[in-house]
Image: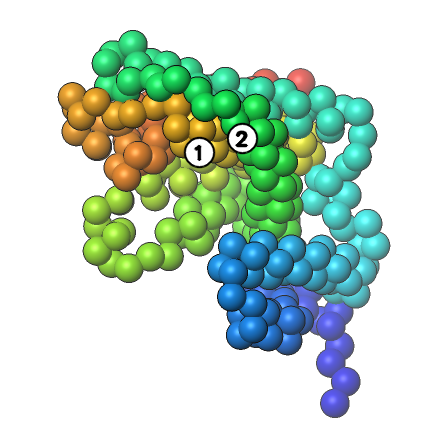
């Protein structure tokens, strides 16, 4: 029986999302199952399977755009462009992310909530390793969430509803954990939701391009990686975790949420300014 995939375009957004993800799982499983079965190194398994998953995601997204929506350049329509402007936006986002993360920890240090430690001799390697990893994370997750997912949502819903749904799905997808963990680290889902909103606003403030969102997302990951993996801080215990971040996650604490909320407000205002310039 021949399936007319072009009809998928007329399905409601939830159905399209489920169909796309089911196809992706079917493509990924034949490669992932043997790897999980025979490769013993858990880190290696994670890296290999994620690389395969995102490579197949990009392949499927291009096929989906061409066959379902008749958009042969759908990755560009998602906002993935290798241009000087997009590259500059990426660097701006990267700088904002890493500087804001360090500003958060510096503030905690000034308040006596964390104690800075002497950097190890391997710090330079940690910085480089973190940069590579964070750029990969920013690229992959933003192409998925602010690219494909946001595009699908905006085909059916208003910009505001799409914004909220995108932030909510982003937060929940990063928070699939046992109930007891959810109950003890609940502030983190607020931070993830707020971050999701910020990244959508970041895309909209740069005319629908993904550079800034990829950079800002990667910058936060990079800064956190340098601080945590580089063992640059130690918590003093002077204030509860709910202030500094539950399980030492800055997005799961009051101060981190205040920092992120301030950035979110600024980025949303930039979006309004850019939109008013485009539509006087």
Colour setting: rainbow
For the residue pair 249 and 116, the one nearer the viewer reads as 116
Q: In this view, does 208 lie above or below 161?
A: above
The quadrant where residue 232 appears: top left
Label 1 element class: helix
For this orientation, the residue located farthest to the right is: 72
- 213 on left or right of 78: left
Q: Which residue lies under the disc numbered 1? A: 229
For the residue pair 87 and 147, the one nearer the viewer reads as 87
| Residue found 50% across the figure and 23% down from its top | 121
Mark 1 vs mark 2, CA separation in Å: 7 Å
Identify the image quadrant of the C terminus.
Answer: top right
**How far across and how far down the image is residue 153, in percent?**
57, 52
Q: Which residue lies under the disc numbered 2? A: 126
**How far across and how far down the image is residue 127, in percent?**
56, 27
| Residue found 58% across the figure and 20% down from its top | 95
Q: Earlier in the sequence, mark 1 or mark 2?
A: 2
**Can residue 24 be seen here?**
yes
- 219 on left or right of 71: left
């Amino acid at each position: 029986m021949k399936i007319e995939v072009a009809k998928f375009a007329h399905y409601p957004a939830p159905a399209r999302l489920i169909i796309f993800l089911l196809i992706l799982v079917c493509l990924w499983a034949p490669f992932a199952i043997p790897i999980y079965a025979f490769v013993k190194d858990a880190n290696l398994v994670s890296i290999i399977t994620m690389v395969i998953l995102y490579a197949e995601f990009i392949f499927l997204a291009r096929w989906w755009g061409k066959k379902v929506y008749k958009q042969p350049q759908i990755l560009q329509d998602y906002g993935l462009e290798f241009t000087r402007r997009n590259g500059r936006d990426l660097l701006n986002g990267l700088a904002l992310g890493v500087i804001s993360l360090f500003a958060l920890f510096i503030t905690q240090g000034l308040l006596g909530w964390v104690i800075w430690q002497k950097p190890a001799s391997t710090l330079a390697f940690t910085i480089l390793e973190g940069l590579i990893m964070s750029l990969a994370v920013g690229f992959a997750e933003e192409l998925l969430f602010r690219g494909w997912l946001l595009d699908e949502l905006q085909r059916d819903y208003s910009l505001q509803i799409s914004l909220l749904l995108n932030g909510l799905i982003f937060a929940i997808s990063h928070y699939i954990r046992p109930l007891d963990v959810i109950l003890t680290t609940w502030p983190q889902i607020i931070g993830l939701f707020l971050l999701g909103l910020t990244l959508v606003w970041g895309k909209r403030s740069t005319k629908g391009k993904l550079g800034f969102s990829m950079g800002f997302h990667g910058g936060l990951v990079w800064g956190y990686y340098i601080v945590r993996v580089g063992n640059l801080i130690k918590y003093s215990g002077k204030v509860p975790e709910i202030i500094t971040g539950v399980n030492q996650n800055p997005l799961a604490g009051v101060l981190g949420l205040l920092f992120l909320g301030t950035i979110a407000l600024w980025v949303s205002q930039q979006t309004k300014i850019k939109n008013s310039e485009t539509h006087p």
